Image (cartoon, rainbow, N blue to C red):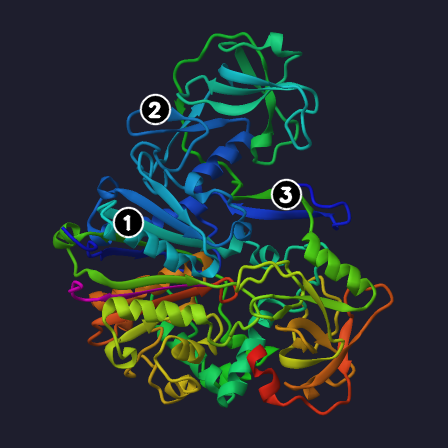
Amino acid sequence: MTPPSETLRAPLVVEFPFTRSLGPVQSAFLTGLREQTVLGVRTETGEVLVPPVEYDPATAAELHDLVEVGATGTVTTWAWNPGPRPGQPLTTPFAWVLVRLDGADTALLHALDAPGPEAVRTGMRVRIRWAAERSGAITDIACFEPYDSDPVAEPGSHDGRFTDPVTGIVAAARLDYTYSPGRAQTRYLHALAERRTVGERCPSCTKVYVPPRGACPTCGVATTDQVEVGPRGTVTTYCIVNIKAKNLDIEVPYVYAHIALDGAGLALHGRIGGIPYDQVRMGLRVEPVWSEDGRYPDHYRPTGEPDADYDTYKELL
Amino acid sequence: MSGKEPVAVVGIGQTKHVAARRDVSIAGLVREAAVRALEDAELTWADIDAVVIGKAPDFFEGVMMPELYLADALGAVGKPMLRVHTAGSVGGSTALVAANLVAARVHRTVLTLAFEKQSESNAMWGLSLPVPFQQPLLAGAGGFFAPHVRAYMRRTGAPDAIGSLVAYKDRRNALKNPYAHLHEHDLTLEKVQASPMLWDPIRYSETCPSSDGACAMVLTDRTGAARAPRPPAWVHGGAMRSEPTLFAGKDFVSPQAGRDCAADVYRQAGVTDPRREIDAVEMYVPFSWYEPMWLENLGFAEEGEGWKLTEAGVTELDGDLPVNPSGGVLSTNPIGASGMIRFAEAALQVRGEAGEHQVDGAHRALGHAYGGGAQFFSMWLVGDTPPTG
């Protein structure tokens, strides 16, 4: 369903570099690629698996009998990729191929550099084109290229030992979303731009949700009745933050508090300022302080009113 | 044949939990725990009918499909393999899904396993995605929990030192557990109390570490239990409950879902006075103050009285309700595995296999896990005799 045009949308990119320890088998395989040597692993029944795995897919046995296979092989199947995407092995159209390297019993997925789909067929002979700079990664094989040769039958044994082995890799993960906060949050955000805090009341339990979610999670019914809350509120509980968080440009120590705005059915979170951190207390009455361009209050400061009685906010803890 | 099949824990395996296991892949890590569980049960891969695996949320480690990637390491090829997904409680929920498969007679013998390699994980980033339009959380992980601890202190009038007593006890218990991550031989109560205040009222020594580790169990039916080489632990009750992370009326100090979950487990097990009828507890305490909070939430103490049990030494290893004899989450925290470690340690106690941290005469023990900002709860109660119901 397409949201109404007035609903807010924005890109959300989630991107992390994850580290991975390789373990003995993958370490040997990737270090081998750096040295232009392709290693497979032999199972108890004598099959040679390339790329190698740590555990036998059929018997679950631990595998460590490494062998060296050829840099030439045979295409077992393929698919043409007419429009390469960023990060793929080649920038020009290419074939995704499964290649059974000479001496192996399983096939490796990679790219084949070919002028067009008419130049690719199952059963064709290919060889590895090594990357000029190799670091111990699958990309050390730049791609495969057509190459006529006779298959080499037998794999050679290999102890898997190399100097300066690769023991870990960094695997980048990235997801691109288009995020929409939905209609209820959009209404809330538009009101915040006018420095008003507008929640929504559940028609069943009558609690006011701030920020609103469009539905009450307890009763499972839509919230449609808009209610302005605050601007003042009560500190229900808090902590004093003494360690600097990454990406946060706030001097420590500071107080991170749960604040129940007057009329709200639950507390929201905010920083307390305008008072020494060690004088903040539960029940302190506060009001928002806005910055020039902030979407949310920069922080909350004491109003000077007497503290709220514990009984007035204990249900909001 | 009527009713549920009784479920027995006949094999338990853990890795030595450490800050970083750079010598093994994730497959190698889970394999180590699984092989130890099979060895404990004196079974082989061929004896396993299904595999149930759990881990922390995907972004923690970026492994999107561990059930796919780890099938060969766990001997699951040609067998059903399921993945369970309930944030920090996942290790407990995973064990319960496996137990239910046996109880329902879907499978006879199930391998269940949970893991986390926090050294290769981005838990902090995974929990704080830069969602557009939303106000960023203004504090780290401890900043989420610390205000709830303060609320507990206000509500109960507990003295400031209670949290340090828990931390000191759990870290000393960990010295008796060879698999625990933190082995702080020189720790004193004074050092705990002098450790830096990170998120006031939570001190550094009152927080859990980041660990790499895995835990596995073999669960089986009565026939499997009869063949087991060592005494089994029998499941007397198990339950899961959920509630929203945030809603109007949520009680963060003593969540309703936790109370309901415990009540369900006790009802199944025929327990009416948990304080007297349960001999040991492995509860999920990521920050020290959660011990007294959960003592109340799980019905071991009246509301407002949990801290008194801690203060009186009742929860010490030689007290009459030992809590976290293994050292708990405060000493070992591979997040995805932490819940299953609680369940497995409870089982070790009633099997009499807990070694130096064995609680004398432990006939019934509770394993407890929670996660997702007190959104998910899972618990089981295990005993040294088969359930009679």
In this view, B338 is above or below B68: below
Residue A26 showing in the rendered view:
yes
**At label 3, which amino acid type do we have?**
Leu
Examine the rendering and report whether any part of residue A317 can be seen: no
Residue B344, quarter of picture: bottom left
Residue A125, percent from left and from top: 52, 11
**Chain containing mark 3:** A
Q: Which residue is mark 1?
A: B101
* B338 and B332: which is toward the camera: B338
Q: Secondary structure at mark 3?
A: strand
Q: Which residues are magenta?
A: B376-389
- Return the residue nearer the eye: B28 or B302: B302
The residue at which mark 3 appears reads as A175
Q: Residue at x 75, y 69 (%)?
A: A197
Report if residue B156 lies within the magenta region: no
Residue at x-position 54% and y-position 59%: A220
Residue B354: % across, % down: 26, 67
In the image, B191 versus B149, the foreground residue is B149
Of the numbered discs in the image, which one, if any, rests on residue A47? Answer: 2
Residue B102, placed above or below residue B233: above
Q: Residues within 10 Å of mark 3 (few under 14, many from 20)?
A: few
Q: Closer to the observer: label 2 or label 1? A: 1
